Amino acid sequence: MNNPRTLLDKVFLVIKGLCMGAANKVPGVSGGIVAFVGGFYEEFIYSLQKINGKAFKLLLNGRFKSFYRYINGSFLSLLLFGMLISYFSISKVLDYFLEHNELYVWSAFFGMILGSIHYINKDFNHWTKKTIVSALFGLSVGIAISFLNPAKENNNLLFVFVCGMISVSGMTLPGLSGSFILILLGNYVLLLVDAVNALYNTISELLQGDFSFINSPERLAILTILIVFTLGSATGLVTLSHVLSYVLKHYKHRTTAVILGFITGSLGTVWPWKRTIYKLSGTGEQLVDSNGKAIIVNYERFFPDVNVSETWWALFFVVFGIGVLLLLDWYGKKRKETIQV
């Protein structure tokens, strides 16, 4: 897992982190898919698994270099660095395009998921009764999740911690969208919009020497929520990685089949042609978040009209999404050839 990385590898790893961060914020898209098709999913899981008792013992004993090497720190730090940048940059760009060109964004993601299905399936030659049943199970769960109705927002700190543990599954389970799970739990806007924006504003104010947020109970409350959510995410990330590393080691083919089925089932969630269903008040008035944005709770899907030019542009972006995955596949093959030489 500790192969020497060239500068280009490091740059690509940060870019993959950017993609994972952006994907994790979009309902219906899984950051785990990026890891899977990018060829670093298993390294990601096994690196997280190294955050265990032995790692903390090294840390407490002041053996920082040994700790860094043990947890594959160069890999995790570059990947997490890309994710952090994404949450305050690319995710905002993504928000803009989702607001102004929503159909084309969803089309590109739909194409990427189609490409990921091909990517996973092309080298999977282990179809048996057990793997077929596993794939059908994953397919059923993926389809079922896309039709669930969302709950109401809940800022209870214990519930927020649980939300963190559950939502991070999108990073470790390809096909399971953590942000979509947050929509179902009712806390997407609170945790991935309001809380992230509050942190962004707080950091901006601190850089300007402005500490006025200390006197704002609302700001402190939402920052507390973000801290609890982050702790829950970190706990879930490490816990799930230990479970998944065991499953991948002992039931790799069946796990891959479940993931393949799950990703296929998630296609309904990212179907490009859909009408947005907004959160409404008791009087039928459209509700907005703290930034004045309408709150999305679900989508109504429909088949496109082939007589409209917009449909053909959307299909172009589907092909573009598939092309992105083919490019990642090409890069992965080139890197393997370079390592072998």
Image (cartoon, rainbow, N blue to C red):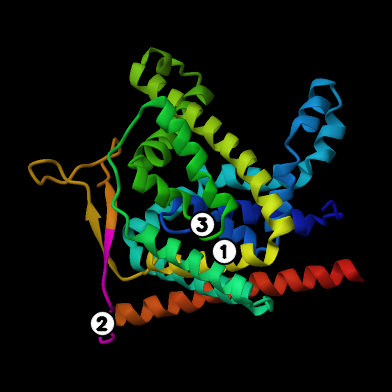
Q: Residue 30 has which mark? A: 3
User: Does label 2 or label 3 sit earlier along the sequence?
Assistant: 3
Q: Callout 3: few (<14), some (14-19), or many (20+) C-alpha neighbours within 10 Å?
A: many
C-alpha distance separating marks 2 and 3: 28 Å
**Secondary element type, mark 1:** helix
Residue 127: percent from the left, percent from the top? Answer: 64, 77
Highlighted range, magenta: 299-308
Q: Return the disc, 2 or 1, that comes first in the chain's sequence.
A: 1
Residue drawn at point x = 36 percent, y = 16 percent: 216
- Eye-nearest disc, 1 or 3: 1
Q: Residue at x 47, y 54 (%)?
A: 177
- Marks 2 and 1 sit apart, C-alpha to C-alpha, by 32 Å
The residue identified by callout 2 is: 305
Q: Image check: 294 left or right of 255?
A: left
Query: Is 306 colored magenta in this rendering?
Result: yes
Magenta-drawn stretch, dominant element (helix, strand or loop): loop
| Gap in angstroms between the C-alphas marked 1 and 3 | 12 Å
